[in-house]
Image (tube, grey):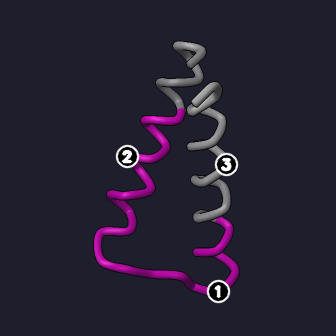
Amino acid sequence: MKNLGMILLGLWLIATGLKAVIQLSFAHDTLVYGILAIAAGALIVLRR
């Protein structure tokens, strides 16, 4: 994967948008969104 950080960021943005628009909710969704955001941020900072 050439740009995994940007892919994870894109997934986080899509998931967050869906949660707001269609009240998407599942068990531990806040934890999953947090982990996804941290992973994307770290990879972007490391330029991976």
Q: Is residue 29 left or right of residue 19?
A: left
How crowded pointer 3 is (Cα within 10 Å; few <14, some 14-19, many 20+) is rated as some
Kind of residue sitting beneath label 3: Gly
14 over 3 or under it: above or below: below
How crowded pointer 2 is (Cα within 10 Å; few <14, some 14-19, many 20+) is rated as few
Q: Quick check: marks 2 and 1 in contact, CB under 8 Å? A: no
Image coordinates for residue 31, horizontal then vertical, percent: 32, 58
Mark nearer the N terminus (3 vs 2)? 3
The circle on residue 10 is 3
Q: Secondary structure at mark 3?
A: helix
Q: Secondary structure at mark 1?
A: helix
The residues colored magenta run 17-40
Q: Residue at x 58, y 75 (%)?
A: 19
Could you give the CA–CA distance between mark 3 and mark 2, rounded to whole angstroms? Answer: 14 Å
Look at mark 1 in the image and give the residue it sits on. Answer: 22
Look at mark 2 in the image and give the residue it sits on. Answer: 35
Image coordinates for residue 15, horizontal then vertical, percent: 59, 65
Please check the rendered image and state whether residue 44 is part of the magenta-colored stretch, yes or no: no
20 over 4 or under it: above or below: below
Q: Quadrant of residue 25?
A: bottom left
